[in-house]
Each structure stands twice: as structure tokens, then as C-alpha cells.
Image (cartoon, grey):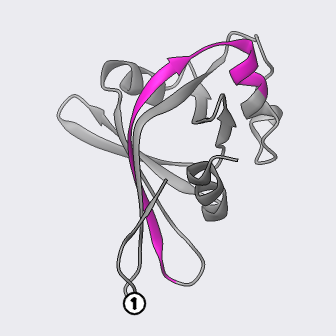
Amino acid sequence: MNRIVEEMKKLGVFFVATVDGDQARVRPFSSVAEYKGQPHICCGNFKEVYKQLVAHPKVEISGMYDGGSWLRVTATAVEDNSLEAQRALLADPTGPSMLYTAGDGRFTTFRLEDVRAVKYSFTAPPEEIK
């Protein structure tokens, strides 16, 4: 499995920051999956976060591990609305399958490209996750 996906899964909940005009927006996510070797996240295509990701695809993601270290991920979110990518996200046990079904026209996935992930700690030097 992609190491970045593994690390994001360890977080449980992670926060996705987007741009909305001149205002930053942050919200919790919990679903991440690997599809074709790359991390993917998903959201409802009727939500404001969807509009923000399409208009400004640069994202920053952050979350805390148990024990006080944290992960920061920067990436470009590229929409991947394929049924296969949707199925990969729906297989994630964190809950999107309770909200959506593949091909329902209500949600989409975003492939994270140009990803840089760094694990930080107050007690150790930063570690780049590849």
C-alpha cells in the first residue's frame, strides 16, 4: 500500500484545507484510499468543498497521530470520477459507503498528485513520507 495512504489512515481524522475566494476553509475527512498507486479522497459533489477543490485544486491536509506527532500533506487534488476510483473509496471502512454508492451521481473522488507528506514531532526531526 502507498505509504502516504498508510500514514493518513493512522490519523483516523484528518483536516483538509481549501480556498474559498479569499477565505481559507478547513473541514474533517476520514476516508482515504489507494487507487492505481495514488492517494484518493472523496466528497459529495453537491458540497461547497467540491466547488472549492475544482476551483482551487491546491490542498493542505493535516492530522494528529496518537502520541503528539502530526502529518502535513500538500498536494494538488485532481478529480477522478471513474467508477473504479469510487469503488476503492467506498471499500474504505470509515463510512463513505453509508452515504454514497458507486455511480450514484452524488459523489466524486480526487486523486492527490504532486504529494509531499512530512511527519512532524516536538521530539524528533521531520520525516518525509514517500
At numbered mark 1, what does the secondary structure look like: helix, strand or loop? loop
Name of the residue lying farthest toward the left: 22
Q: Is residue 65 above or below residue 107?
A: below
Tag 1 residue: 123
In the image, taking residue 64 as reference, residue 32 lies left or right, namely: right
Q: Nearer the viewer, residue 3 or 122?
A: 3
Residue 93 coordinates in the image, percent (x, y): 82, 46
Q: Nearer the viewer, residue 86 or 51?
A: 86
Q: Is residue 37 above or below residue 124?
A: above
Magenta stretch contains residue 69: yes
Amino acid tagged 1? Thr
Residue plotted at (38% across, 39% down) = 75
Residue 57 coordinates in the image, percent (x, y): 35, 27
Q: Residues within 10 Å of mark 1 (few under 14, many from 20)?
A: few
Q: Is residue 37 above or below residue 54?
A: below
Residue 89 visible: yes
Magenta stretch contains residue 34: no
Q: Which residues are magenta?
A: 68-87
Q: Nearer the viewer, residue 4 or 83?
A: 4
In the image, taking residue 101 as reference, residue 18 lies left or right, namely: left
Residue 39 coordinates in the image, percent (x, y): 58, 38
Name of the residue lying farthest toward the front: 130
Residue 108 coordinates in the image, percent (x, y): 61, 20
In the image, taking residue 126 as reference, residue 49 lies left or right, namely: right
Number of numbered callouts drawn? 1
Picture quadrant of residue 128: bottom left
